[in-house]
Amino acid sequence: MRHYPLYIVAGLAFASAGCQKSPAPAVQMVAVQGKVTLDGSPLDGAEVVFTTPLMATFTAQTSADGSYQLATAGKGSYTCSGPCKVTVSKFVMPPGKTAEPNRAPQLQGAQQVLLPRYADAAQTTLVANVPEQGGQFDFPLTSR
């Protein structure tokens, strides 16, 4: 029978204990929803992004009636609550071009149709102070 030094056996025991996965923290979702309009009409196909002070992002795409409901963009135990910076953007492909799936439209020549005060994270004027239980946040945008 072969005898291994105690430090090798102890090292293997610690290494195998460290390999066990702990469960990932649950993402706590709060109901954050709303409607986005442009010049009074529902804005279909726009991306709505809420960014918390800790840089957690929550995103949604607007439907035909302009409504959206946020989801988390990553894993973690973040909730969308507190003061959030909000951006709303919409990219449109040039006439005769079709966007490739699974590739960012702006990398395919699409143009932003919304003003930087809505679409640019550095310039946005949109904010939402989300309570812990969530809430309804409507964004009436204008093209001027």
Image (cartoon, rainbow, N blue to C red):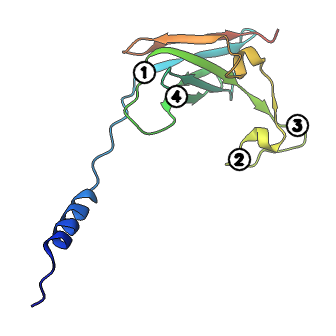
Q: Secondary structure at mark 3?
A: loop
Instruction: Identify which residue is drawn at 59% across, 16% down.
Output: 35
Q: Residue 38 appears at what percent x and percent y?
A: 73, 14
Query: Residue most toward the left?
Result: 1
The residue tagged 1 is 31
The residue tagged 4 is 58
Q: Secondary structure at mark 4?
A: strand
Earlier-in-chain disc, 1 versus 4 = 1
| Between 114 and 16, the one nearer to me in the picture | 16
Earlier-in-chain disc, 1 versus 3 = 1
Residue 138 seen in the current view: no
> Mark 1 is on which residue type?
Ala
Q: Residue 44 appears at what percent x and percent y?
A: 69, 25
Instruction: Identify which residue is drawn at 58% across, 17% down.
Output: 85
Left or right side of 27 for 40:
right
The residue tagged 3 is 94
> Mark 3 is on which residue type?
Pro
> Mark 4 is on which residue type?
Phe
